[in-house]
Amino acid sequence: MSAYLEKAPLFQALRRHQRLGRASFHTPGHKSNPEAFPQDLLSLDYTELPDTDSLFEAEGPIREAEEAAAHFFGTARTVFSAGGCTLCIQAMLRLAAPEGGEIITGRVIHRSAVQTMALLGLEPVWVTPRPDAGAGLPGRVHPDDIREALRLHPKAKAVYLTSPDYYGVLADIPSIARVCREADVPLLVDNAHGAHLWYVGGGLHPISQGADLTACSAHKTLPVLTGGAWLNIREARYSHGAKEAMALFGSTSPSYPIMASLDLCRAWLQEEGTASFGRLEQVVSGLKELARGKGIAQPLGPCDPIRLAFNTASMGTPGEEAAQWLRERGIEPEYADGGHVVMILTPMNTQEEIRRLREAIAAFPVKSPLALPSALPPQPERAASPREAVLAPSEWVPVDRAAGRIAAQAACPCPPGVPVVMPGERIAENTVEFLISYRISRIKVIK
């Protein structure tokens, strides 16, 4: 090995992890499977040239690729992002409320959305999900609660939700979309973990269920390079200025291999998506049934058919311990918390990897169940707007000395995207307890 390689710590760490040989049940969706991409993709790392087009102008092959995706997905417009789902979230919030205003939004929200609301001067009107998905999970925002929020805030510019959440729990998008149409406001969905939902459960993608704009993190569940995402826009009336909105936040040097992988993925989905995800849905159904037979609880109600979220506390093992138990058996999960282990399967997982997971589930130890606390703390008191809090002079303080202070950042661990406190909210004693339970030791507060 060349001497300079030994002096590259990140490169070496990635190589060491690769040598562990663990089955990948985490993002990215391509699973480092050599069959996911053409082998010469890295050699195509070019830039904006006369014959390669430019992402934010898109008058040549990028435009053709985006139009092909829009035609395939049945949208008025689909826009590529090489800046992940974050860039799509930023753009769709800009499109929905270019001059600020109120946004009706669920409390289960990615930190990038909170930060974007602060930058754009948007005022979130929080809607708390109902705890209907099982112990230790945040649950779902319900249509009636959205309707009431819109009644109380008739000037709201949009409704913004996360569906599916990190555990695969799905909101009732068709009913919420009807509520939004009645109020004539767009429904925006952070669909980061659901780019594949066109192909499972008979078609569960938010766009096909009535959402107006979705941010879809393709690299999480599809054969796309990390950072590849789609902004999907169902109706033309919401698409004007989409490129400008994305350019406001995006890099002027997007990765061409990432964009090419989005184009390749759409072509692959056209040829093999239905069959590949049909087979995977059957496999995951069998794994879920095996887990149920062991007594492992799983989220209740409508969920992503190919997301595995096991409540290992129901079998007497905290999620972090269960994740380590899996690693010792050659399996790397996506995420673990105090009570759950989450695993992401895609068509790029090999039969050997699935066999390894099936055997691990069958061998999972059974002990006395553990109780799980609520997934969401009581909503703190609002003391300032998100914009005021994020831009104000601030300081870092130990969490155990933060009670009474006003948060200057979102304490919203990702994963799993469950909020504890938002910028502008006053940190209460019970908020401190939740922060400590998330192993957060410091927080930024307004001076």
Image: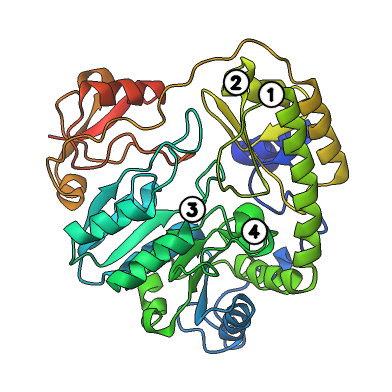
- Percent position (x, y) of residue 326? 72, 25
Q: Mark 3 is on which residue type?
A: Ser
Sequence-wise first label, 2 or 3: 3
Quadrant into which the N terminus falls: top right
Q: What element carries label 4?
A: loop
Relative to 77, is 196 on the left or the right?
right
- Percent position (x, y) of residue 404? 14, 26
Sequence-wise first label, 1 or 2: 1
Q: What element carries label 2?
A: helix
Q: Mark 4 points at which residue?
A: 225
At horizontal 77% and vertical 32% (from top left) the residue drawn is 290
Q: Mark 2 points at which residue?
A: 314
- Asked whether residue 249 is in view, the answer is no
Mark 4 vs mark 2: give the one in front. 2
- Percent position (x, y) of residue 426? 17, 33
Q: Mark 3 points at which residue?
A: 163
